[in-house]
Structure formats: structure tokens, C-alpha cells
Image (cartoon, rainbow, N blue to C red):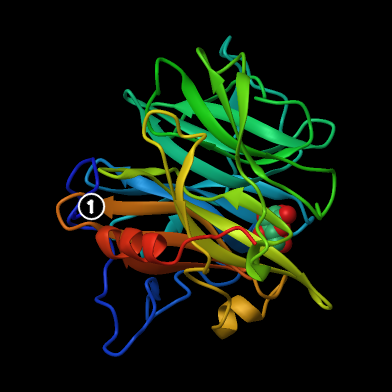
């Protein structure tokens, strides 16, 4: 059975065919990285960022680590989702009453999506420690910050692109205050983006070594005819630190707390110099995809080595076939 993406055609996404002879199910853009160091005045490194189609072109919310060390969120625009113009000024939020919100101390690893005509950002926000911040915008000029979704500590808050059974649904990853040495993916639900509950465990770490320390949801899940395609990061611990690889699984369409297929293998792991060398070596951290429902093409936008932004490609039917044929088996 051929798997297709449930969504709109988007023929202008970045794309390159798989290199001849490649055995990978996800392959890199040959001109990576697409964002290098020091492209804006305020920040040296732009990575772990989120992009979406907007008015026939592309827009994004980018994590820029500033010269004072704190990450902030910046808007960026692009005609082709490859060459980006990122604003020097970071986003200044308003409260729901229209008054300027208390400036955020830090914001990182944003995810971005549209639900029913409103754009939402979720990110890791300081709230006496890291938790999940939420904001909305209609025009990427005025941003309204909502209440934080959870108590600290939590990271990798990723909303589904539509309500499911009447609720907003968010994947998230309870954590600690530092470089958390554990972490499973949970799911929480809300009728209004303020009150969150009905928490469920979605996916736990695995005995397979590349994902035996912690997991975190990556881009906004992609709806397909076979289930929600959840691209995630899996982490292992080595003598010289964590290694972040990219994995993929399918979740049940009606109850996405149920994993219907998960894969024993990573689909991308740090190999290229821009992934293995940088501020934090050996990190591939996906935060967004662009996909074309007509062809099943998926472009994955990922942070590399906490320093660069990069692109990789996959095709939905091939990827889901790969997940199913390499199951994450229990010991
Ligand atoms: C995680 C987050 C990510 C980062 C990763 C690797 O805890 O802070 O932003 O990419 O560590 O340093």
C-alpha cells in the first residue's frame, strides 16, 4: 500500500534526488550547511530552528545564540527555504492584553505551525528553569505570548497540526534543569492551549544504542494515510558526550499516544564535518519539515552541531516502508 501525505501540494520546497548508489533513506542537501556562522549582528550561531510556507514563500522562527550566550528567537524570511534573511532584532512578545510581555530570558529550539489560520510557536522557555512556551501570531509582526504549557522542567514541546478529538495535542519531554541524562516522549492535551492534561507516555528510550539515553520529538508531525509520521531525535552517551541522531516512527491517527511502527535504525546520524564539529559536536537536531503532498517529498530542516542549519531529504512512502521493515524490537 502506497503511503501519501494528507495535506497540500507544495511544489516549491527545496529538493534534490537521492544520490545514485546511496543506501540512505534520508540524504543531505549537497550545499549544506544552509546557514553558517555570524550571519546576524546579535548572534553567532543559528540552528535548531523552524520554518514553514508563508504567502507563497517561506518564513521561520530561528534560534540564534547571542554573544551573551543566551539564545533568542528571530524571524527569518526566504523565497526558496535555502537562502535566509534573518532579522537582527529578536522577537518581542506581547501579552494577551496587548501590553509588552516581560522579556524572555532565553528561548530555544522553536517549532512553528499553523492551526486554523493562526501561527503558533512552541519553544523551550525560561520559567524558573526550562519549560515549554507558547505564542501565536497572524502576521509575524505582532506575537502574543500565552501561558507556559507546563511546570519546569520540560523541552521539545511539539504541537500536532490540527486538533485531535477536539483538543490541541502536544508532544513534550519532561526533563531536568541541565543536560538531562534521561527522557521519554509524552503527549498532553488541551481544549484551549492554557489547561493541559490527559498526559500519556508515547515513546520510551530503546535498547538500540543510538537512542538509549533520551528521545525528543522533532518537527511538527506529518499526517499521512498510515498515521502521523513523527521524526524525532535519539541520543546516546559516549565517553566524549552525547550523540544526537534522527529517528522516525508512525503514530496512530486517532490516538497519537500509540506508536504503531518505530524503527530500530537511525535515519540520519552525524557524519559530515558541519555535524561532527562545532559548538557541540555530533548533533543532528531536526525541528521542521516542508512537505509536498503531491509527490511525497519531505525536506527536513535540522540543526547541526549546535552551530549550523542544514537540510536533508526523504520521501514519505520510502521512509515509512523503511520504518516498517526495520522494526524497533524489544530485547
Ligand atoms: C539539548 C538542547 C538542544 C541542543 C542539544 C545538544 O539539551 O539544548 O538545543 O541541540 O542539547 O547540545
User: x, y percentage for residue 261?
Assistant: 44, 51
Label 1, residues with CA under 10 Å away: few <14, some 14-19, many ≥20: some
Which quadrant of the rendered structure holds the C terminus? bottom right
User: x, y percentage for residue 170?
Assistant: 54, 31
Q: Is residue 257 above or below residue 76?
A: above
Which quadrant of the rendered structure holds the N terminus? bottom left
**Residue at 51% from the left image edge and 61% from the top image edge:** 247
User: x, y percentage for residue 234?
Assistant: 62, 60
Residue extending farthest to the top is 97
Q: Is residue 98 above or below residue 181?
A: above
Q: Quadrant of residue 198?
A: top right
User: x, y percentage for residue 46?
Assistant: 58, 61
Q: Nearer the viewer, residue 16 or 268?
A: 268
Q: Quadrant of residue 132?
A: top right
Q: Quadrant of ligand 1?
A: bottom right
Q: How many marks?
A: 1
**Residue at 36% from the left image edge and 34% from the top image edge:** 253
The residue wearing badge 1 is: 3
The local secondary structure at tag 1 comes to loop
Q: Is residue 141 visible?
A: yes
Q: In this rendering, would 118 be left or right of 329?
A: left
Q: Nearer the viewer, residue 7 or 35?
A: 7
**Residue at 38% from the left image edge and 60% from the top image edge:** 324
Amino acid at each position: 500500500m502506497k503511503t501519501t501525505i494528507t495535506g497540500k501540494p507544495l511544489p516549491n520546497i527545496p529538493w534534490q534526488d537521492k544520490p545514485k548508489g546511496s543506501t540512505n533513506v534520508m540524504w543531505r542537501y549537497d550545499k549544506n550547511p544552509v546557514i553558517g556562522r555570524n550571519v546576524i549582528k546579535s548572534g553567532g550561531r543559528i540552528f535548531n530552528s523552524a520554518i514553514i510556507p508563508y504567502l507563497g514563500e517561506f518564513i521561520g522562527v530561528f534560534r540564534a545564540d547571542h554573544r551573551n550566550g543566551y539564545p533568542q528567537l528571530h524571524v527569518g524570511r526566504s523565497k526558496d527555504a535555502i537562502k535566509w534573511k534573518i532579522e537582527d532584532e529578536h522577537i518581542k512578545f506581547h501579552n494577551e492584553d496587548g501590553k509588552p510581555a516581560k522579556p524572555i530570558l532565553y528561548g530555544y529550539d522553536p517549532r512553528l505551525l499553523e492551526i486554523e489560520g493562526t501561527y503558533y510557536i512552541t519553544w523551550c522557555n525560561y520559567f524558573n528553569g526550562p519549560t515549554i512556551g507558547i505564542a501565536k501570531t497572524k502576521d509575524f509582526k505582532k506575537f502574543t505570548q500565552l501561558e507556559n504549557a507546563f511546570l519546569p522542567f520540560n523541552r521539545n514541546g511539539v504541537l500536532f497540526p490540527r486538533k485531535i478529538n477536539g483538543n490541541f495535542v502536544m508532544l513534550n519531554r519532561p526533563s531536568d534543569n541541565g543536560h538531562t541524562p534521561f527522557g521519554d516522549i509524552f503527549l498532553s492535551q488541551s481544549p484551549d492551549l492554557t489547561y493541559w492534561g490527559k498526559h500519556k507516555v508515547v515513546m520510551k528510550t530503546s535498547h538500540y544504542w543510538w537512542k538509549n539515553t533520551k528521545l525528543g520529538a522533532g518537527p511538527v508531525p506529518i499526517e499521512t494515510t498510515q498515521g502521523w509520521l513523527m521524526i524525532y531525535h535519539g541520543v546516546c552517551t559516549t565517553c566524549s558526550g552525547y550523540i544526537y541522531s534522527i529517528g522516525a516512527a508512525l503514530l496512530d491517527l486517532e490516538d497519537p499516544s500509540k506508536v504503531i511502527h518505530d524503527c530500530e535504525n537511525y535515519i540520519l546520524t552525524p557524519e559530515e564535518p558541519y555535524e561532527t564539529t562545532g559548538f557541540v559536536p555530533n548533533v543532528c537536531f531536526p525541528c521542521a519539515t516542508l512537505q509536498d503532498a503531491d509527490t511525497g517529498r519531505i525536506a527536513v530542516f535540522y540543526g547541526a552541531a549546535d552551530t549550523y542549519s542544514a537540510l536533508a531529504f526523504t520521501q514519505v512512502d520510502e521512509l515509512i516502508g523503511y520504518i516498517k521493515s526495520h522494526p524497533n524490537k524489544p530485547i
